Image: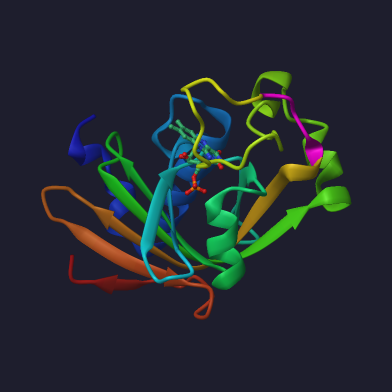
Amino acid sequence: MSLDLHSWSNELGTLYDHAWQRLVRGVHDRHAPARHPTLATVSPDGLPKARTVVLRAADKSLGRLEIHTNLHSSKIADLMARPLAALHVWDNGSRLQIRVEADVEIASGADVAHTWARVPDRSRTAYSSSHTPGHPIPSALAYDNAPDPSVFAVLHLNIRSLDLLHLGSDHRRAQFTRENGWAGQWLVP
Ligand SMILES: Cc1cc2nc3c(=O)[nH]c(=O)nc-3n(C[C@H](O)[C@H](O)[C@H](O)COP(=O)(O)O)c2cc1C
């Protein structure tokens, strides 16, 4: 795609809209760059932790993203200690880096029963209570895949700020915060 076509990057409003379009596309298109963002948390002992996740929902009007996970995974312990996360996407087609900082709410049990009902069987195997993800096992496949809805968790990322960097013939960077009503501020790239 020619960089000349990236006229959306010229204005704060169109840059913001484009970033949300790309996030929403990640939810619906398994081949889109935003399908697999990197989610970063801080462990209880203060170490940065990053891992690939699937973006499950993106709501521009609420400034909210959704990720599904296993309640026993270590990211949950991180988020219980500090309910804050960063999310990162590099969208090469748009030459756009999207960085999100968010407050995170963890939902599980009856609160997510309606979401669990829509999780396909092939995805449900990630939510097994037989072993904690990251637990040592005697051989590579010594774990069980039996789905258990009680370990299914939904992470709601309530976005504090979006930092967008576009690489074009001129680079542009802007930050959008909930605090300023997503108005946007240009930054030195
Ligand atoms: C392509 C891909 C998609 C993934 N999607 C998710 C996901 O949506 N949720 C999740 O909890 N882990 C997902 N994982 C696994 C995580 O990267 C990670 O290994 C696991 O959640 C344990 O992380 P933790 O110990 O830091 O909590 C995915 C991994 C890959 C490679």
Residue shown at 69%/33% (left/top)?
128
Q: In which quarter of the view is residue 147 placed? A: top right
Q: Which residues are magenta?
A: 145-149
Residue drawn at x 44%, y 37% as measured from the top left: 36
User: In the picture, residue 87 is in which quadrant?
Assistant: bottom left
Q: Position of residue 135 (x, y in %)?
A: 53, 41
Q: How is the image coloured?
A: rainbow
Q: Is residue 87 above or below residue 26?
A: below
- Residue ranking furthest to the bottom: 179
- Single out the residue that lies furthest toward the right: 110
Describe residue 41's horizontal placement relative to residue 146 as left or right: left
Q: Is residue 53 left or right of residue 73?
A: left
Q: How many marks?
A: 0
Residue placed most toward the observer, 34 or 154 = 154
Of 182 and 51, the residue lying toward us: 51
Quadrant of the image occupied by residue 114: top right
Q: Nearer the viewer, residue 43 or 163?
A: 43
Q: In this image, 151 relative to 38: left or right?
A: right
Is residue 177 placed above or below 139 in the rendered structure? below
Please state the horizontal and vertical placement of residue 102, each as a whole percent of the image: 52, 66
- Left or right position of 50 against 35: left
Determine whether 125 is above or below 61 in the image.
Answer: above
- In the image, what residue occupies the spot 16% across and 48% down? 168
Magenta span: predominant SS is loop
| Residue 146 is one of the magenta-drawn residues | yes
Residue drawn 64% across the image and 59% down it? 61
Which residue extends farthest left? Answer: 169
Considering the image in quadrants, where does the C terminus appear? bottom left
| Residue 158 visible, this orientation | no
- Decide if residue 61 is in sight here: yes
